[in-house]
Amino acid sequence: MASPLPDPVPLHLLRRALVTKLRHHGDVLLASPVFTAMRNAAPALEIDALVYAETAPMLEGHPAIAQIHVIDRAWKTRGLATQLRGEWALLRTLRARGYDLLVHLTEHPRGLTLARLLRPRYAVTRERDKHARLWRRHFTHFYKLPRTERHVVEQNLDALRRIGIYPGEADRGLVLVPGPAAAKRVDEMLGHYGLSPREFVQVHPGSRWLFKCWPAERTAALVDLVVADGSPVVITGAPDDRERALTTAVLAAVQPATRARTIDLTGQLGLRELAALTARARAFAGVDSAPMHIAAAVGTPAVALFGPSSEVAWGPWQVRRRVVVSAHSCRPCGLDGCGGGKVSECITTLPVESVHAALASLLAETAH
């Protein structure tokens, strides 16, 4: 079938493509269907990724990716000479790959630099008003974002639609490969605690943005109820002082009987190990965060609490789920707390009973 576009990219004539996603962990994972759709549309095309070094595990093992290139944001903290060496080595590597197509999925200005220095025959990015003439000098295609809300996965895939790739349902799933090493370590950890797969509920209270988080005492009350219902709880969190403090507060607030059936793995798991653990959970409960997207990627039913961010754009993708939100007319506002005060009433006031009911309903629906 011929493309309805007047200027589709002739994929059959291309050898290599570079897809860039210079954002956070969850953003990178939500771009994983782009690689699947490109590979299915052009099986002979070699597709590389460019991401920040800390987010690379989200794409490692993706069957559609030939090579993953990284930008280490620590370069600039090690002095100008180190940064220049790192940037030059990366540029030489990318140039040697000889890309015919650049798919730039963020607003990051590095896209302009890459388009100028790599000189791909085709380059696509989102439409923008700021410096539009400069972008149009170096990009051949621009995709549009709707005024209405649209899930970020579909926004990423819109870049491909603009060049003549129309993803099917089989292309849209998130891809995250924990790998055998991560699976082995997680199985050993669960065995140490006497837990079996699909026996426990995972609770992940934190986020890199604390204004998205539920209060510790409410998370603790939920953990009490889950344990009372008969399920052990595994609490996870990033190796971050703020998330550790949140987890510590949660554990301090649970009932003594609950603590005996709650395992704290905060800071003990790498990203792929976290994915392996989540894949073994009965369900995931947490806020809008990268671990919530990991749950969707590995097919674990998820209860997601949303406050200032949009569940339409960021909700758990293609997985059985419950989304709990407040009735505040101002949400989703996208602000870092009410008035920029770092505390979001739309999430701090979510009732424990509503979250517990959502989780109980999901567990009953997915029971085997």
Image: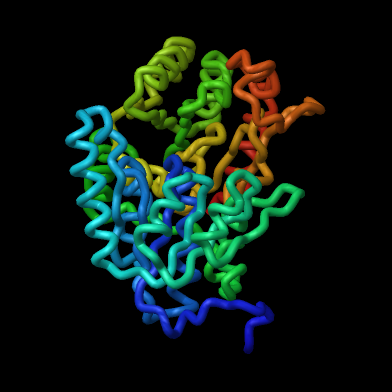
User: Is any part of residue 363 visible from this angle?
Assistant: yes
Using residue 241 as the reference point, say whether residue 328 is left or right of it: right
Q: Relative to residue 37, is residue 311 depicted above or below?
A: above
Residue 288 image position (x, y, % from top left) = 56, 35
Quarter occupied by residue 330: top right
Q: Residue 338: x percent and y percent?
A: 68, 17
Quadrant in the picture for residue 359: top right
Relative depth, front residue between 77 and 84: 84
- Name the residue located 53 percent from the left edge and 77 percent from the top edge: 9
Please tell me whether residue 5 is drawn above or below residue 210 in the rendered image: below
148 horizontally vs 127: left or right: right
* 140 or 319: nearer the viewer: 140
Q: Residue at (53%, 46%) from the top-left corner?
A: 107
Vertical placement of residue 183 versus 160, above or below: above
Numbered-mark total: 0
Which quadrant is home to the N terminus?
bottom right
Q: Residue at x 23, y 49 (%)?
A: 88
